Image (spheres, rainbow, N blue to C red):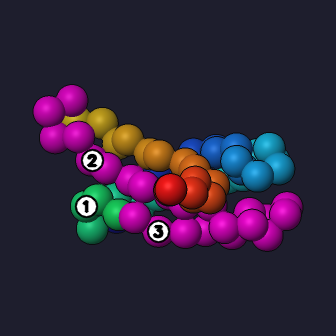
Amino acid sequence: MNIKHTTITCPHCGHPMHIDLDYSEGDQDYFEDCANCCSPIHLNMHINALSRKLELGVSADDEQLY
């Protein structure tokens, strides 16, 4: 299995959170709840084939478009 252990910071409350990223299925876009404040965290995982790195975007996903 292709799993990477990392720590992120909740964009809502600032609490550090340990997560496991399974990149065996390629690019992923999903939500995970913060263990501290229970707010949803939007995670966007991308495997950059050129640099051979795993890129992770973390956001509150509460941006409003007008």
Q: Residues within 10 Å of mark 2 (few under 14, many from 20)?
A: some
User: Contact, CB < 8 Å: mark 1 with mark 3?
Assistant: no
Amino acid type indicated by mark 2? Ile
Q: Residue furthest top?
A: 51
Q: Dividing the picture into quarters, in which one does residue 51 lie?
A: top left
Query: What is the CA distance from the residue labelled 3 to the residue labelled 2?
Result: 15 Å
Note whether 29 is above or below 45 in the view shown: below
Query: Is residue 3 visible in the rendered structure shown here?
Result: no
Query: Residue 14 at x, y = what percent?
Result: 80, 44
Q: How crowded is mark 3: few (under 14 residues within 10 Å), some or many (20 or more)?
A: few
Mark 2 secondary-structure assignment: strand
**Magenta span main SS:** strand
| Residue bearing mark 2 | 47
Residue found 50% across the figure and 56% down from its top: 65
| Residue bearing mark 1 | 26
User: Contact, CB < 8 Å: mark 1 with mark 2?
Assistant: yes
| Residue bearing mark 3 | 30
The magenta segment is 29-51
* Quarter of the image with the N terminus in it: bottom left
Q: Dividing the picture into quarters, in which one does residue 26 lie?
A: bottom left
Mark 3 secondary-structure assignment: strand
Is 22 left or right of 18, judged from the image as shown? left
Query: What is the CA distance from the residue labelled 1 to the residue labelled 3?
Result: 13 Å
Query: Is residue 26 visible in the rendered structure shown here?
Result: yes
Amino acid type indicated by mark 3? Tyr
Note whether 55 is above or below 65 in the view shown: above
Disc nearest the viewer among 1 and 3:
3
Residue found 35% across the figure and 63% down from its top: 28
Residue found 57% across the figure and 57% down from its top: 64
Query: Residue 10 at x, y = what percent?
Result: 72, 50
Q: How crowded is mark 1: few (under 14 residues within 10 Å), some or many (20 or more)?
A: few
Query: Residue 30 at x, y = what percent?
Result: 47, 68
